[in-house]
Amino acid sequence: MNKNILKEKSHAFAILIVKLSQSLVNDKKEYVLSKQLLRSGTAVGALIREAEFAQSKADFINKMSISLKEANETLYWLDLLKDTNYITEEAHKSHFKLNKELVAMLVSSVKTTKSKL
């Protein structure tokens, strides 16, 4: 796994999530769902950063697995925001696509590391 690509993509995704959350608060006056999205969407990259300095392979797997769970939760919030008309279909598609890429990379990373134990 090239950690730099995953780190860069998760950081870029977090920036998009922060901007989307700000837009939801400022334009739609939506505070609850946007906060959930902000929490889970930014946690993905934070956990990837934590995993960089994991104390062991097991610790690395644990942090990356939690990051994967946060990424999956973010998919849920994006779906819910689309289904309740807080975000457009177009905004949903672009954010969802990037998030799915992160999920795929995280799954691959966890599987590869587990196979080396």
Image (cartoon, rainbow, N blue to C red):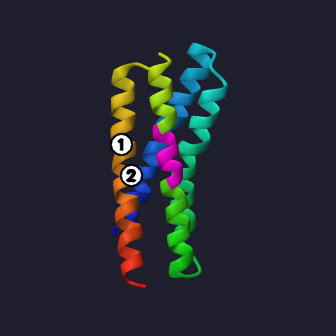
Q: Residue at x 62, y 36 (%)?
A: 36
Q: What secondary structure is the stretch in magenta mostly built from?
A: helix
Q: Residue furthest right?
A: 32
Q: Position of residue 8 (x, y in %)?
A: 41, 54
Which labelled disc corresponds to residue 98? 1
Q: Position of residue 71 (x, y in %)?
A: 48, 48
Q: Residue at x 38, y 61 (%)?
A: 107
Magenta range: 69-75
Q: Residues within 10 Å of mark 2 (few under 14, many from 20)?
A: many
Q: Residue furthest bottom?
A: 117
Q: Is residue 14 above or below residue 68?
A: above
Q: CA distance from mark 2 to mark 1?
A: 6 Å
Q: Nearer the viewer, residue 26 or 44?
A: 44
Proximity of marks 2 and 1: CB atoms separated by less than 8 Å: yes
Question: In the displayed structure, does residue 51 sit left or right of residue 9?
Answer: right
Q: Is residue 104 above or below residue 88?
A: below
